[in-house]
Amino acid sequence: MTEQSGVPDVAEQRLSASSFSSGLSVSDFAACLDMGLEPVGLVQGFCAVRTTSSLNFGNGPAGFTRSTSPYQLSSGDYVENYQCPHGMVSGEHRMWGQNYQQPWIENTWRQGFTNAFTRMVKEANTIGAHGVVGVLDNVTRIGQEGVLEFSIRGTAVRVPKLPAPSSGPWTTYLAGQRLAKIIEAGYVPVSIVAAVSSVRVWASCITEYLMEGSGMTMWAQNSDSVEVEQIVSARMAARALVRNSVRAQLHGDQLHGVELNIREHEFAKGDLEIQPVLRGNRIRRFKDFDPLPAPRLTVRLS
């Protein structure tokens, strides 16, 4: 690894080859050339991180208390408690339930994604790229030891005869016609943004009964359905948290091409772990919108 660029030697050899590589489709490649963007190389970044978190079975996280506004706590953590309405029933009966945010999981994910992204941008900067288009990212679990591998790659592009930007290359998930339409609308890509939130559901007795179906006859006597309040609240909180995290990365810019994926892991008796991942393109207006020309008649059917 060279000290100046921070790029591994094998990547230096690949990037310094006389030929270029591209991860674009034929149509996206042609659209880039039409916009004046010259593909110069496929760039990528990787990171593997080990998660060391525990799930606090039985006692829940220490120090969490109920708030009348569970989505906007001063500490930045979400927590919501659910009390049992029955009193002491048996030793196995759940006397309380709780939804709570797991910031240690979010921090691990953020660290892995940021490190992989930074390494991809360094590769693009090494070859004098102005931007990276068609970015793809993937997170996979390695083995059974809680190791996550983050992989991010894209096609570095540049504008011929222009010097590389001093602030580093911009990045975007967009490519081809979608990127062309954004620029035509008066926006330029700034960076990709991504975030995860993690909410753990430790089910109360009522939630456990409803998730297993055994509580329907008791709580839905006058209705064909009953809402599982604790699960609904956890899902809404997880989405609100990940949206707030992405919004903090925009710094006044706008978000385009949003993609929301929800990962859930069910433990037992209504216990869940909810982890939404939100991705998008940070874009910035640089000119007023130029209206498209009126459509022209090309075929007459009379």
Image (tube, helix red, strand yellow):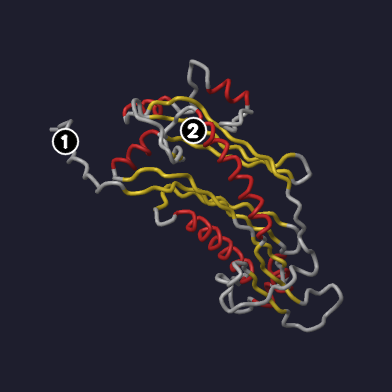
- Secondary structure of residue under mark 2: helix
Q: Local crowd at mark 2 within 10 Å, few (<14), some, or many (≥20)?
A: many
Q: Nearer the viewer, residue 250 or 70?
A: 250
Q: Is residue 296 left or right of residue 95?
A: left
- Image depth: mark 1 or mark 2 in front: 2
Q: Classify 10 Å Cα crowding around label 1: few (below 14), some (14-19), many (20 and above).
A: few
Instruction: Give residue 87's quadrant in the image.
Output: bottom right
What percent of the width, then of the height, locates residue 127?
48, 27
From where the camera sits, is residue 31 visible?
Answer: no
What residue did someone put label 2 on? 125
The x, y position of residue 286, in whole percent, is 30, 46
Determine whether, in the image, residue 124 is placed left or right of residue 296.
right
User: Which quadrant does the N terminus fall into?
Assistant: top right
How much space separates mark 1 and mark 2, taking CA atoms?
A: 43 Å
Given the image, on which type of amino acid does mark 1 rest?
Arg
The location of residue 203, given as percent across then percent down, is 71, 68
Q: Quadrant of residue 120?
A: top right
Q: Which residue is mark 1?
A: 296
Of the 4 image quadrants, the one containing the C terminus is top left
Q: Position of residue 265 (x, y in %)?
A: 69, 54
Name of the residue lying farthest toward the left: 302
Q: Earlier in the sequence, mark 1 or mark 2?
A: 2
